């Protein structure tokens, strides 16, 4: 894979600025987003700064806004590095940090011009699809490797963020675009191996029933989050749970057992109302990180991304950053408990949605008004699962709203992959609709979000519905 040369050359000014501040001992302030891509990006940059001996502080934030940036300015850092957000808030960065050098490593849609004191690296500026071909973690990895070739050992984290952002849109659920360059470097360094198989979480590390219960992409109604039900399911279809006294993992099953399991799960999901096409999401490319212990969640790329996402969404992002930095002790135990709690929460939220008439259909969109019934940090995940199950019409986006703890309303919007290619760009829609109600929004074509004032939800949804219909009619 050979990405455009101008994209790779765009890292040098940012790396030079970072090195100059590190050499003179400036405090480097790293700000990143609260999801798997953001946490892995923050971990990469933290590791790179640590190796250079630079003083740094990393925090994981749910959004960029003026009060948060004012607080950063009061810390008087020499350099602020944004990753997995920043490009959509260039004017705000310039206003809030007028005299502070900044680096923006992002893959979201830029808005406005970068301030003179800021260096922006964004694949979209070079014709590269930031939704599918490289995540912020990939941008952060290439940046780190530009700083020091030793940082090639961070290539797995560059892939973890891409998997967390569901960029596995290639053949057999593989990564594509610039992500392939990162894969190649990871394989050459002896860090990665790939295979095609059932892609339950815990392919090598978990008993089969637990692996099924831990799988949320796709979400398996009645089994995801419910290990006891998964045990009963396996017993019913005649797949032994043990070999002697040892629990069997998915990698222990022979090909006939895997075919039997896939067939039974297909029938179960269709019977539960899932689209038959979503069943094929159970098979795909498995990313195995060879330097990680076989018994840990970091061994599998998707499981690693799920762990980091859970830490971020459950308001414990420091656990995820610690694991990215190499902590395999107490932090990992705490993180695994956090993942279990996170999956139980998702299961409960999905039951809440499915058992009540929660989703309303407008002309061009579906609306899920969650209020305080779904955590603002998890409402986007719930939306993705609902869309991915095929229960909703694939040609309509789902736009979800949940009350935020700062008095605003968190908006998450998702659209099926095929529909995004039909002219809908949710990032632009969120930006325009939120601006119309004195909020702020942005994102990718297929996944975007916003924060709006409470009380403006109806007007916001009306604007979104009109904008989606308008983009559709123009495509």
Image (cartoon, grey):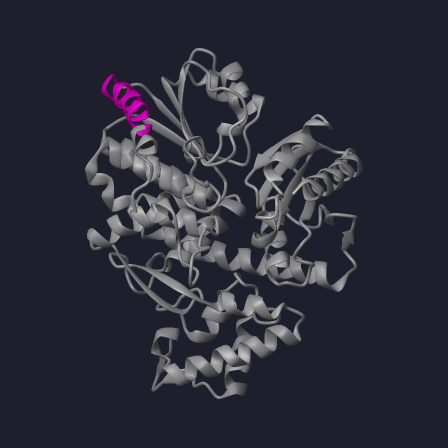
Q: Is residue 22 magenta?
A: yes
Range drawn in magenta: 10-24
Does the segment drawn in magenta span residue 254?
no
User: Image point 71% across, 59% down: which residue?
Assistant: 352
Q: Quadrant of residue 440?
A: top right
Q: Quadrant of the C terminus?
A: top right
Outermost residue toward the top? 99
Instruction: Choose between 395 and 66: the one closer to the eye.
Output: 395
The residue at the point 29 percent across, 64 percent down is 294
Residue 276: percent from left, percent from top: 60, 71
95 vs 71, nearest the viewer: 95
Q: Is residue 255 above or below residue 377?
A: below
Q: Nearer the viewer, residue 27 or 430?
A: 430
146 left or right, relative to 96: left
Is 365 placed left or right of 31 in the picture? Answer: right
Determine the main secondary structure of the stretch shown in magenta.
helix
Could you tell me residue 312's position as x and y percent?
A: 49, 45
């Amino acid at each position: 894979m050979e990405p455009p040369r101008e994209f790779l050359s765009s890292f040098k000014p940012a790396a030079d600025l970072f090195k100059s501040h590190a050499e003179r001992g400036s405090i480097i302030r790293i700000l990143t987003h609260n999801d798997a891509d953001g946490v892995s990006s923050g971990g990469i940059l933290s590791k790179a700064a640590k190796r250079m001996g630079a003083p740094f502080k990393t925090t994981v934030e749910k959004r960029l806004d003026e009060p948060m940036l004012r607080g950063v300015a009061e810390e008087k850092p020499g350099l602020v590095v944004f990753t997995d957000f920043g490009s959509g808030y260039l004017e705000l960065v310039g206003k809030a940090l007028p005299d502070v050098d900044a680096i923006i490593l992002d893959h979201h849609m830029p808005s406005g011009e970068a301030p003179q004191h800021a260096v922006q690296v964004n694949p979209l500026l070079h014709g590269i699809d930031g939704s599918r071909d490289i995540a912020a973690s990939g941008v952060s990895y290439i940046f780190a490797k530009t700083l020091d070739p030793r940082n090639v050992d961070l290539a797995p984290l560059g892939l973890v963020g891409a998997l967390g952002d569901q960029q596995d849109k290639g053949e057999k659920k593989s990564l594509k675009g610039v992500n392939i360059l990162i894969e190649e470097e990871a394989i050459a360094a002896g860090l990665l191996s790939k295979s095609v198989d059932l892609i339950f979480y815990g392919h090598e590390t978990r008993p089969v029933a637990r692996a099924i219960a831990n799988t949320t992409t796709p979400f398996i109604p009645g089994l995801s989050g419910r290990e006891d039900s998964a045990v009963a399911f396996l017993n019913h279809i005649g797949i032994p749970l043990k070999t002697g006294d040892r629990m069997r993992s998915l990698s222990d099953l022979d090909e006939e057992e895997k075919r039997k399991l896939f067939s039974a799960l297909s029938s179960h999901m269709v019977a539960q109302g899932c689209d038959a096409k979503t069943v094929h999401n159970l098979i795909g490319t498995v990313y195995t990180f060879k330097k990680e212990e076989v018994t840990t969640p970091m061994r599998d790329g998707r499981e690693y991304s799920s762990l980091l996402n859970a830490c971020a969404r459950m308001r414990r992002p420091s656990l995820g950053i610690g694991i990215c930095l190499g902590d395999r002790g107490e932090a990992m135990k705490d993180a695994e408990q956090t993942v279990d709690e996170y999956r139980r929460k998702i299961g409960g939220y999905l039951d809440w949605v499915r058992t009540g008439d929660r989703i309303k259909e407008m002309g061009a969109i579906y609306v899920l008004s969650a209020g305080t019934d779904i955590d603002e940090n998890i409402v986007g995940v719930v939306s993705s699962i609902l869309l991915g199950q095929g229960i909703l019409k694939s040609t309509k986006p789902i736009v979800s709203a949940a009350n935020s703890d700062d008095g605003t309303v968190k908006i998450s919007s998702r659209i099926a992959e095929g529909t995004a290619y039909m002219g809908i760009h949710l990032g632009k829609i969120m930006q325009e609709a939120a601006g119309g109600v004195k909020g702020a929004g942005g994102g990718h074509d297929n996944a975007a979000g916003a924060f709006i004032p409470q009380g403006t939800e109806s007007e916001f949804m009306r604007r979104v519905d009109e904008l989606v219909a308008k983009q559709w009619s123009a495509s």
